[in-house]
Amino acid sequence: MEFKHKSVLLEESIEALNIRPDGIYVDGTLGGGGHSYEICRRLSEKGRLIGIDQDAAAIEAAARRLGEFGDKVTIVRSNYCEMKPQLEKLGITSVDGVILDLGVSSYQLDSADRGFTYREDAPLDMRMDQRQTQTAKDIVNQYSEMELYRMIRDYGEERYARNIARHIVSARSEKTLETTGELIHVIKAAIPMKARATGGHPAKRTFQAIRIELNRELEVLENSLGEMVDLLSDGGRICVITFHSLEDRIVKNIFRQSENPCTCPKDFPVCVCGKKSKGYVVTRKPIVPGDEEQEINPRSKSAKLRVFERTKQVSE
């Protein structure tokens, strides 16, 4: 299957990056190369793009799509949390911009055998990096009821999390749950029929929770976003596109903290903690897709773009 992914908020994010033709840019979630292609188009012969992705299919597709830009492009198979060491290997210590388009790609959702979709029956997989040994099947069959409940409640924001966890444990005691279809059957049985009639597919939130847990998505974002801000050169920008409230909250908080890291009590007349601002949040409110984009690409509906600009650090 060909890797296809419609880049969300493409024009808005490229504009927000404020691209310098001679600059160095990192696409930490390369995917099919949609954002990267538009960045490369705006670079001079001196400009450079480093694309990072952990999905082999994405790497292959992006390499084809970006081939026309030759040596301007370097593609690395890794997780964006490894951005700093991967750049150091390339002799790069600072960059002019970073873009992250989080969540699961259209290709991953549409490739039934990857196990991300609840629309077709497939093995319970959900790995973004197929070199990883643990799969969704391991989580579903090995986590305790309490661990399943916590995961589905916190990462899926599912009101019937406790009942779903109980039903999973009961079902797997009779037979190992192997496929997305088997899991969906269990989830449907755990949700009252009246609730199943509204709010989209009944398995949507549970599948989201398992995917986030398996790929450590929130943990990776929380642990690496601040480091990416530190990688930016003066005037450099980082653009992050999120698709659910938990991701968006992390981005908002880290950007806010980077802008105002002072930990002094509010009643102190002057700052004594010595923590200096790293820049400013460009987007006081997140940028969201317009009606036209939402209509063309329904998956864009929950997208939010936040932007941070690094400013010159003046040493005392």
Image (cartoon, grey):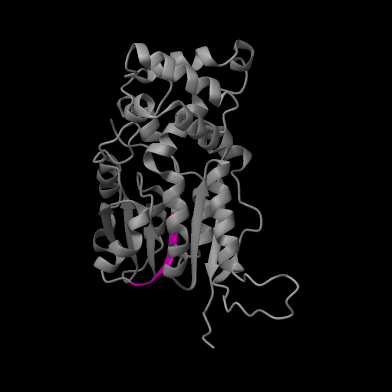
Magenta span has 75?
A: no
Q: Main secondary structure of the magenta part?
A: strand
Residue 282: percent from left, percent from top: 60, 63
For the residue pair 6 and 177, the one nearer the viewer reads as: 177
Camera sees residue 129: yes
Give the quadrant of the C terminus.
bottom right
Residue 2: percent from left, percent from top: 29, 34
Q: Residue at x 56, y 71 (%)?
A: 279
Q: Residue at x 43, y 32 (%)?
A: 210
Segment colored magenta: 93-99
Can you say whether 169 is above or below 232 in the image? above
Q: Residue at x 56, y 48 (%)?
A: 248
Indicate the quadrant where residue 290 lies. Answer: top right
Indicate the quadrant where residue 120 lies. Answer: top left
Q: How many labels were placed on the picture?
A: 0
Residue 3: percent from left, percent from top: 32, 37
Q: Residue at x 47, y 53 (%)?
A: 222
Residue 273: percent from left, percent from top: 60, 77
Can you say whether 234 is above or below 65 in the image? below
For the residue pair 130 and 72, the one nearer the viewer reads as: 130
Give the quadrant of the N terminus.
top left
For the residue pair 42 and 90, the one nearer the viewer reads as: 90
For the residue pair 131 and 310, the one nearer the viewer reads as: 131
Camera sees residue 202: no
